Amino acid sequence: MPNWGGGAKCGACDKTVYHAEEIQCNGRSFHKTCFHCMACRKALDSTTVAAHESEIYCKVCYGRRYGPKGIGYGQGAGCLSTDTGEHLGLQFQQSPKPARSATTSNPSKFTAKFGESEKCPRCGKSVYAAEKVMGGGKPWHKTCFRCAICGKSLESTNVTDKDGELYCKVCYAKNFGPTGIGFGGLTHQVEKKE
């Protein structure tokens, strides 16, 4: 029977797929709403799909079903998988793991990675990476990175430091810069002789 103006058939639901709603994968057409993993039903796109013959899967389910089997395979670097493969009928013997001591060999590395972060000199609270600004060799909160005298917000172009405190260039020059005649202000009042 001829196909009168209809599109291709969907690989999942077998209904007509029109161009406005078509996604193609492995030479087959799918509705956007039918383009999901055949195992976990997760919605897919061109970066998450893995095809096997006429079936489409997300990369995780594809790896579990068709990838290498064994501990440490199929999950990628930096990913801890607790999937033992029991649902696939696989059994593994795990060797006992050596006990780790409760104390760390280098506490400074441990605290830098997991615990205490550096403290802001102005408020004394922890400074985390998202809010960290360096000035005078110390970490500051963005909100604490202000002139100690006038409170002006500072940037790398107008910050100066003295004795662990931050100042804008104007306040630094007024308070710690050279003084006297010719340096922008008089320190002593000069009397006129008549």
Image (cartoon, rainbow, N blue to C red):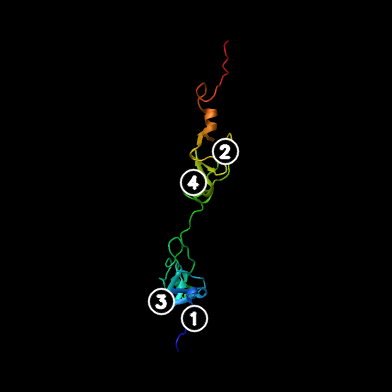
Secondary structure of residue under mark 3? loop
Q: Locate residue 92: give its quadrant.
A: bottom left
Of the two numbered discs 2 and 4 on the same chain, state the one appearing first in sequence: 4
How much space separates mark 1 and mark 4, taking CA atoms?
63 Å
Which residue position holds label 2? 152
How much space separates mark 2 and mark 4, taking CA atoms?
35 Å
Secondary structure of residue under mark 2? loop
How much space separates mark 1 and mark 3, taking CA atoms?
15 Å
User: Can you tell which of label 1 and label 4 is closer to the viewer?
Assistant: 1
Crowd class of label 1 (few under 14; some 14 to 19; many from 20; radius 10 Å)? some
Residue 16, labelled with which disc? 1
Which residue position holds label 3? 27
Secondary structure of residue under mark 4? helix
How much space separates mark 1 and mark 2, taking CA atoms?
65 Å
Q: Locate residue 126: give its quadrant.
A: top right
In the displayed structure, 173 sits above or below 95; it is above
User: Where is residue 94 drawn, in percent x and y?
Assistant: 45, 67
Amino acid of disc 1: Thr
User: Where is residue 47 drawn, in percent x and y?
Assistant: 45, 67
The quadrant the C terminus occupies is top right
Which residue position holds label 4? 108
Of the two numbered discs 2 and 3 on the same chain, state the one appearing first in sequence: 3
User: Can you tell which of label 2 and label 4 is closer to the viewer?
Assistant: 2
